[in-house]
Amino acid sequence: MIAQIVGPSKSGKTRAVENCVGSENLVLVAGSQIAEDVSLWEIVLRTLRAPTSEETGLTEGETLGGEFKVAGGFTIPMMAKAESEVSASRERSKEFARAATYESDPFQVATDQLKALKKVLFLDDFHTIPVAMQPMVAAQLKAAAQVGVKICLAEVPHHSDSTISALPDLTARVSKIEFQYWAINDLIAIGTEGFRKLGVTISPATLNALALESAGSPQLMQLICLNVAEFLSIEEKVESLVTLQLDISQIRQVLITTHAAIDRDKIFGILDTGPDERGSPRNRYPVVELGRCDNYEITLAAISLSPPRATLAWGSGLYNLYDRIDKICLDSSNKPAKGQITRALEQMQSLAERHMPRQPIIEWSDATGLHILDPYFLFYLRWSEKYEPVRSKIM
């Protein structure tokens, strides 16, 4: 069986596997590393520092021999010098070597090494493998599992069937373990436990506000809590237990500091600007706090609203794009239609894939809706200088 961890980005999938298996026992490969000229097994062999070829050689030769015969009936080695009558017997030798190099089958060598070293192959984001290569890689994973290689896959929920789609023969050979974005209480526990070890108690209201902004990501919650500790000048465990509460302005300051530490400025600017305008300029509509905005700005402004949501349907459910756009557009009769927004989302997805191919940012599908695949981008968007005022006004 192949184990498959299914869960949102930055929800702790890799860390959970490391804790379970041991990081020293993992051979980690990202799907985006695999390409037409770089196979999965070549990456495994490089990670294991295993050779991909072997050389065999044959050396032949004869030993130098012979002696000098010296008058008088005794012998001396060839190297000696004698002025007497000498008869010498010497065999000349030639030494030569022949070598041949044999290329090994990367699949065979890699699977043998993984089994011999008792390693687990951990393949992250199968869907990022080039589509044309996915059936072949899936077939190889099946073959590797059949010979006893331990394999674990990690995938985001809306791509969890990519492996099976690439190779239907894997049906019933993949065992799914499902992760979700962390619940608020679990995120609060990170702050509770972490600050307890520093001898500090942070008020439940403060931790709840921080957990909400973490968008289900334990990594982001840890980063925010680190910035809280720095804001409070807590660098080591305090001697006596203290209880602290941050007011709204202090929480905002911490979150803005966290925003500055997140490197999403470039992709934010690309998506906010959209593709180059061709022909006539884009239509623009009146938006709360922003003046007149195009479809790209309106889409990002809607995503930035509270509560932070990694998944938004168009018009159904409690939180959806239609309602959010309606809230930010000042004139309900003068706002973009669904088709304009969905085209903008498709363009934004294409731009994100082109400029950040190794870190999926955004994905739109008519069937499953909008997915923000990177909690750090969502946080950066919400606390950007441009869109935070919109959210503040709507709240």
Image (tube, helix red, strand yellow):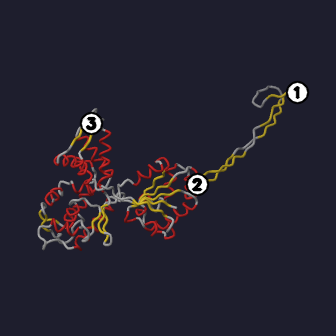
Which residue is denoted by mark 3 in the rendering? 241
Q: Is residue 28 left or right of residue 348?
A: right
**Identity of the amino acid at label 3?**
Leu
| Disc nearer the start of the sequence (1/2) | 1
Q: Is residue 63 left or right of residue 290?
A: right
**Identity of the amino acid at label 1?**
Gly
Residue sitting farthest toward the right: 73
Which residue is denoted by mark 1 in the rendering? 73
What distance separates the C-alpha of mark 1 from that of mark 2? 65 Å
- Give residue 217's position: percent from left, percent from top: 32, 54
Q: Residue at x 23, y 67 (%)?
A: 321
For numbered disc 1, what is the local secondary structure? loop
Label 1: how many Cα within 10 Å (few below 14, some 14–19, many 20+): few
What distance separates the C-alpha of mark 2 from that of mark 3? 55 Å
Q: Is residue 228 left or right of residue 150?
A: left
Which residue is denoted by mark 2 in the rendering? 112
Of marks 3 and 1, the one in the foreground: 3
Label 3: how many Cα within 10 Å (few below 14, some 14–19, many 20+): few
Front-most of residues 160 and 342: 160
